[in-house]
Image (cartoon, rainbow, N blue to C red):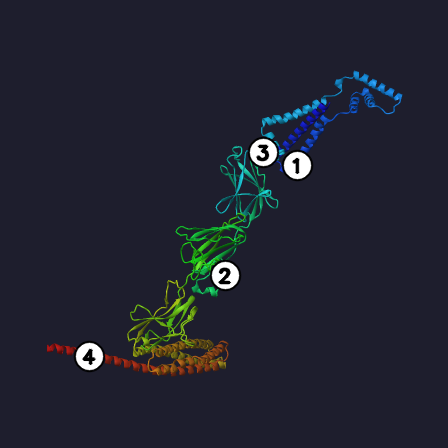
Amino acid sequence: MRRDAALTGICLVICACGAVFWSTTGLDQGWFLLQRLELPTPLRVVLLTVRLPLLLWLTVRRIAFPLVRRIADADVALLLERRFPQFQDRLLTSVEAAAGYPEHSPLVEGMLRRAAGEAESLSVTTPAAGVFDPRSLRQRAAAAGVLSLSVIIPGLLQPGLLPRWWSAFVLCDDVYHLRTTALEVFAVAQPGDRRREFQKEAEHLVYRHPRMADLELELVVPERDEVSGREWVVPERVRIDVTRPDGTRSRVFVSSTSPRTFRFVMTRLQEAVTVEFLAGDYRSAVPYEILPVTPPSIDAIDLDCHYPDYTGWNQLRETAIRVTGSEVSLPLGTTFRLSASSAKPLQSARILSDLFELSGDRETTRVIPREGFQPLFQHLPPLLSPDGRTVSVAFALSAGTETAGPQTGSGTTAAADGKPDASGGLPVASNTALRFFLHDDDDVMSVNPEVLRFRGIEDRPPVITARGSGIDTAVTRLARIPITGRIQDDYGIASAGFRFLVDDETGWRPRPFRRPPAEGMLEFDLQREEGQPFEVFDVQPLELSEGQTLTMAVAAQDGNPASENGETRSEPLIFRVVSNEELLSLLYTREIALRRRFEEVISQLEQVRDDLLFHQEVSRRLDTGDSAAIRPEDQVAVTTCATRSGNMLRRQTNELNAIARGFDEIVEQLINNAVPPKQLAENMRTRIPDPIRQLTGQPVTDADRAIGEFRVAAIEARKTLALLQASHTQVSQIVITLRQILENVRDLAEFHEALRDLKAILEEQQRLLNETRALQKRRLIDQLKGLK
């Protein structure tokens, strides 16, 4: 009986196992057909934790317990009475009587014996085979056999079925289906088409992609399975499902671009997306998450500069510079430490120039020289700061290609603090662009480099403007030549003075200024002393003779010791030494020209005076208001006269001022050339240019005002006679004064004519004297020949 119970339990356990096998297998197959994925591992773990206790309980309850348990006689009696109703309750009564009843009477004892006897007689006639019904056991055994065969036969026909089920629902492996296709997913990062793998983070595979850049994914079907050696099947196409943060989905099918490669591109990715892949019987088990991140960039660039000593900028200007654009200009020879701040921590950086490539991280720095560039560099500090947010390197701005070693600027000395004012740096040629390529901790590299161009400010030579003042190209031996001008230098003047040549000399001779510029001045105006904005070159100490040539220039030099330009000179001023008489003759020629211009001015103003006088009668007719006497053109004539007179007066005033300046120049030349008598120059100044300037001052202003009032009245058709007469009076007075000045000019001209005649006489006398001497010499020679 216990054996039958155990067998029944075994069949029940087998049926339960078969049912669990097929239910879980069906669930797994249905899920795989729908999703191409394994059942979620947590679900399989839950099923295992529920299934194992139930099977254990069923095994103990239905198999182990019946084998060890003893069935009580009363229970057997009840079972038999239920199977054979004819026993009624005699069997149970007999079993209980066998144990004995306490304190029973003889009547009860008789009844018990009778019941036991009847039970015994009935048991003889009852068939033993009918006590237990084997049909239930056979049914359960059949069911167990069918379920066992349903598992064994498919397991034999499909060898992988049972191991797959075991891996899935017992071992709870993440992957247990044998697929024919596999995919390896890579991101193609720029620059350089770098193949990058997705990184495992929590439950996702994550790739950080630069925001607003095109995303390119490369899907590769491997050749063979590394474990089994099976060749993977290449699908016709791959389905890609893209899920966005707002829940929207898009599906794309891509075909192969090469025998085992598929490519998928998303343009200008701005938001995070989750991507899943389905290819044949393969589906990505873990979502691929793509997170857009800000690409690395430079927030600010600071330069700590040490300028060449000759510039003086280290004391006059800030040495710390914040670069605000893509270009910075510094004096050639400047050493500086460049500090570029990044918005994100960097793992490495590269700086490219025409001479070298500089790469490094938080621990090292490496310099790769270009072709034709000799590397002479020493140990360099790390390119990145410990936090990875600052790129720091020292440079030296040079004029051209140099060796790639630490360069020492002018006046610098080596020190251990690494500052640019104490040590040199890698050379950067003028007009060179540094291109910064950044690689941040998100493994994102900058596609478009940050560019910073350095322009070297070349030390230009001093700029000199110089010209003679109150002097012409002809000078006397006693002349003093006033020179006005300005000297400018971008960093400061070191020295300045005169340089001169006599005749055909090739070496410039120096002569200092009476008041030289202070060292370091950026701009200097030539001045002899306060109130005299010129320097004077004295010709007398040279003891030159008439006919010699003096070439003079203003020279200056800046403080750059490495300057190749040396001394800078102004445009040379060339002077010819002449006699006083010749100089006066030249000045007389200029004076005649000025006198003619002066006479022309008087003539023009006389025309203005006559024009005003002529229109007085016209103005009188208009003022009387007699319509019979007024002509139609009178008003226009008066207005035109006023306008013409005003314009002519202003034009001739400008001409008078120019004539006065011309006479001033003659006076200055007389003074600067020390032409005797000294009173001649002063007389000319007091009799000609000074009266002209007095005349063009208040008198001309009054006349112009009077003509202006006359013109306004004429335009407004008011009475003009009185204004016209006042204008005529003012202009007439100016003409009278000019006539008086003209007399002075003529008197001076007569004096110069006398000097010119005297010069001509002297020259004729000298010619005759020379001819007489030559004749006497020939006669003496002839006489000597006759004596022989």
Q: Is residue 362 above or below residue 55?
A: below
* Label whose residue precedes the other's in the sequence (1 or 3): 1
Q: Nearer the viewer, residue 316 or 154?
A: 316
Q: CA distance from mark 3 to mark 2?
A: 66 Å
Q: Nearer the viewer, residue 108 or 722?
A: 108
The residue beneath circle 3 is 177
Q: Nearer the viewer, residue 260 or 492?
A: 492
The residue beneath circle 4 is 773
Label disc, if present, on residue 116 of the rendered structure: none
The mark lying in front, picked from 3 and 2, is 2
Report which quarter residue 495 is drawn in: bottom left
**In the rendered structure, which amino acid carries the disc numbered 4?**
Arg
* Label whose residue precedes the other's in the sequence (1 or 2): 1
The mark lying in front, picked from 1 and 4, is 1
* Label whose residue precedes the other's in the sequence (3 or 2): 3
The residue beneath circle 1 is 46
Q: CA distance from mark 3 to mark 4?
A: 138 Å
* Label whose residue precedes the other's in the sequence (2 or 4): 2
Tag 1 secondary structure: helix
The mark lying in front, picked from 1 and 3, is 1
Whole-percent x, y for residue 308 in the image: 44, 62
Q: Quadrant of the C terminus?
A: bottom left
Whole-percent x, y for residue 669 in the image: 35, 77
Whole-percent x, y for residue 108 in the image: 88, 22
Tag 2 secondary structure: strand
The residue beneath circle 2 is 320
Assess disc 2: are there few (<14), some (14-19) or many (≥20) residues with their C-alpha within 10 Å of its C-alpha: few
Q: Is residue 617 visible?
A: no
The mark lying in front, picked from 3 and 4, is 3
In the figure, is residue 268 to the left or right of 28?
left
